[in-house]
Amino acid sequence: MIKISKIRLSILLLVVVLLVTSSSCTSCFNKYVEMPEGVTLNVSSEIKGYLVQKTLPSLHFDYNGVRVMMEAHGSACFFVSNDQYVLSDKFGEHLSKYSKEQIYVVSVIDQEYDKEKAVFDGKKLTLDEKDEFGNEQKYSKEYQLVITDKDGTRYSYQFRTFVSESKRYYIYRYSSNMGISMEQPLMVIKGEDNKNKLVLVALPYETKYEVGPNNIKLEALTEKDTYLDEKYYKYAYPDSIKDLADNERRTKVMDWYKTYCNGRLNENDEFVFEYYGASFKVDFGITDCGNERNKDGFKLTYLG
């Protein structure tokens, strides 16, 4: 067993503390770009040439002069080296455009480093005893959200938030910067030239998926036949509805597609929807969904 000397242990502890307490600067030494007219997220530039759809989703964050690190080939951004007060206000304005029905909380945790006071812009702001909804507020909270835009595209948001002197603040999480990323679930199909093509897919609520540009190399998607298998397009019901009766789960999924993607029954009594010019069929009663192929869910089939 290797023993760490007291000096080395002290150094390691100091490094951990610095990483936690200075995470607002986790990206200070990385390159950022300043966006004079705000920042727009687009579909990953890496996959655009392989997509069936030619009209594609995008999302604009309105803050002239905002500084961001762009990642995932333009489909994600992280906010760095900004005026924290301006960014907080702009972030709040941005979130306010969504209704509560569009927002799904994937994770929320109390940030216990912020007991009674929250770190913000190098200061410690006193937390109100209760937030604007009357909930007790001992700590700030760190969130991971999935938000559905009006076109059916999902975006992931991460941030820390709290209320001080009746004002809501938004700031970096202790482990990462504030960020927004476009969710890009994909389906792999054979094109007319017998080459692999990619199709962007719309998925309801916080449904998990296996095929996407951020977790699978482009070469594997376009050069191999692995992801042509229909098993990858059998989706387990999301956690927010998994415990409902089966007829309720089906209704929830169909209602989501009706709201965002022109979901409807076609002349063959099949439930179909459209997403940026691509059409899909939804089959229910599927029992081998999810990574372990043992969960209830639904299957998507590309129609053209």
Image (spheres, rainbow, N blue to C red):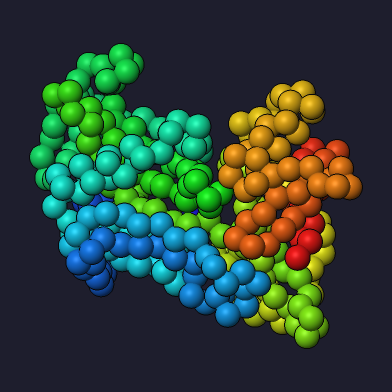
The residue at the far right in this view is 268
Can residue 295 be spotted in the picture? no
Residue 66 image point, x, y percent: 21, 60
> What residue occupies the far front of the structure in this picture?
267
Going by the image, does 8 lie left or right of 297? left
Looking at the image, residue 223 lies above or below residue 210: below
Q: Can you see residue 83? A: yes
| Depicted 189 relative to depicted 282: above or below | below
The reply, left or right, for residue 41 in relation to residue 63 is right
Residue at far bottom of view: 193
Q: Is residue 211 above or below residue 208?
A: below
Q: Nearer the viewer, residue 195 or 124?
A: 195
Out of 285 and 96, give the one closest to the viewer: 96
Comparing 301 with 109, the one in front is: 301
Total number of numbered discs in the rendering = 0
* Image-quadrant location for residue 215: bottom right
* Residue at the spot 67% in from the left edge and 54% down from the top edge: 274
Which residue is found at the position 41% from the left and 38% from the top? 98
| The quarter of the displayed image where residue 69 is located | bottom left
Residue 1, x across and y down, in percent = 49, 55
Give the quarter of the figure containing the C terminus. bottom right
Q: Position of residue 2 (x, y in %)?
A: 44, 58
173 relative to 181, above or below: above
Residue 290 in the image: state x and y as whole percent: 74, 47
Residue at 65% x, 40% y: name it.
258
Q: Nearer the viewer, residue 35 or 121?
A: 35
Residue at the spot 50% in from the left edge and 61% down from the top edge: 57
Q: Is residue 238 left or right of residue 109?
A: right
